[in-house]
Each structure stands twice: as structure tokens, then as C-alpha cells.
Image: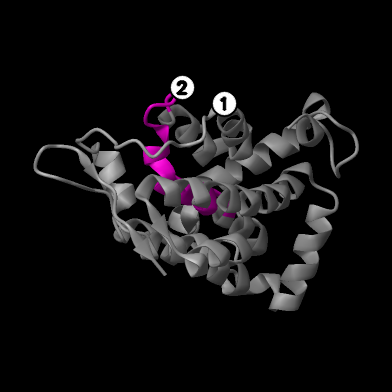
Amino acid sequence: MSYLFCSDAPPGESLLQVRPETWQEAIALSLNFWCVLPALLPGVAPVLNPAFEGLFNLTVTWGLLFWGFAVDGRDQRFPLLPFLLGTAFLTNVFYLPWLALRQSDSISPLQPPLSPLERFTESRFFPILLTVVGLVACLWAAVARPEFGAWGDRWQALMALVGSDRLAFSFVVDLGVFWIFQAWLVPDDMQRRNWRSSVALWVARLVPFLGLVFYFLRRPQIAYHADGQAAQVSKTA
């Protein structure tokens, strides 16, 4: 985090030297979050490089996908929810401290009931929804705002921005770190469910974003016996 925000090594100005234009850029991206404002009120929405907006929205969507590990916050010294909320807005600024503080999951049964958030993130609908959002972000980057030219022009402009803008550069770093995160957290989640699948494990480790979606769709959901104890589903694939 100090490398991204305080060091002079990455492209663009550090947090200590940030210009008003950078804050305006961050506000514009937030206003265009998930392309809602540009789609509904294009005359009001800030105009940015759509490839840059797509990169931002994909980064935020991938961060939200880690809410699929919400049950990881049980029996931890620090609650996970504040870190998940922070990750939705400042990505790795919040998630890296959580990984440093978290304890490896034990296979002791979870205590019911699941919270509404946990039930939602355990559902199959959750990863499917974020997959759709991620695909929309990629589609927006490729075809939105025709005045920005063909995909090749957009890509070149985005690469130039990543090479000169600290915010754009940080999004690319976030994507790489998220890829490491999913490879790190999936084995613990498998242990929590007493489930083994070499296919799901290696897809999650090797395929960014969609590999984690695949894992969430394949993993057994946490269920409970009538006595209220968590039923650990054993499955080998």
C-alpha cells in the first residue's frame, strides 16, 4: 500500500502530491459506478475513457466477489464486514489488512443461523450477478462512447493512462493482487466445507475472476442439521 500511495516509483503523483485533477477523476469514476449514470442520464454523467471506466468497474466488481467468503469472518478476532465494505470502495487498502489479521479457518462447525448477507453470498445468484456486471464492464470498455474510436484506440489510450496515472495504475495492481487473493482463500473455504475438488481448486487458482465464479458455483452450500449444527458436506471431484 505504501508503494502505491506514497512511493514515487509508480506512474503518476503520490498521495502526498495528488493534484485536484486526480480527485476529480476519482469522483467522476464513482459517479459513473457500474455505468448506471451514463446509461440513464448520459448528459449529466462525466465523460471518461470508457476503457478506464471498464477497468474501474471490473476492479470494484472483483472486490465485491470476495464477499462470497463472508462466512470466513466467523470466529475471527476482527469482524469481516467492515473490511468488505472498505474493499468495495478502496479495494486492497482494506482487504490486505484483513488477510494479515485473519486466522486460518478451522473445520469446527459453524453456528447457525446464517445472516442475510451470508445467505445471499452463499447463493448461486450472487456470483452470476457479479459475472453479468463484470461482462457489462468489459462490454462498456469495448463499445461505449463511439467517439473514443475502435478497441485498438481505446486500448492504447488506456495503456498510456496506466503508464502515467497513479489511479489507473493502482487498478491494474489491484487486479493482480485479487488473483493472488482468490488462490489463497479458496483452500480454506474448501476445508470449511470438508469438500475437495482438484478441478475447482486449480481453475480458481489459474483463471482470474471467472475461476472464482466457477468455484462459487461448484462449491457445496453450507447446510444445517435439525439440531442446529452445521452440516459439513463431503464431496470429492
Q: Is residue 192 left or right of residue 187?
A: left
Q: Is residue 35 above or below residue 106?
A: below
Residue 78's disc number: 2
Image height of 224 relative to 128, above or below? above
The C terminus, quarter of image: bottom left
Q: Which residues are magenta?
A: 59-79
Q: Which residue is mark 1?
A: 101
Amino acid carrying label 1: it is: Leu
Q: Is residue 38 left or right of residue 168?
A: left
Residue 33 at x, y percent in the picture: 50, 50
Residue 117, position in %: x, y? 30, 40
Q: Secondary structure at mark 1?
A: helix
Name which residue lies at 50% across and 40% down.
88
As helix, strand or loop, the secondary structure at mark 2 comes to loop
Between the C-alphas of marks 2 and 1, the distance is 8 Å
Confirm whether the magenta stretch covers residue 60.
yes
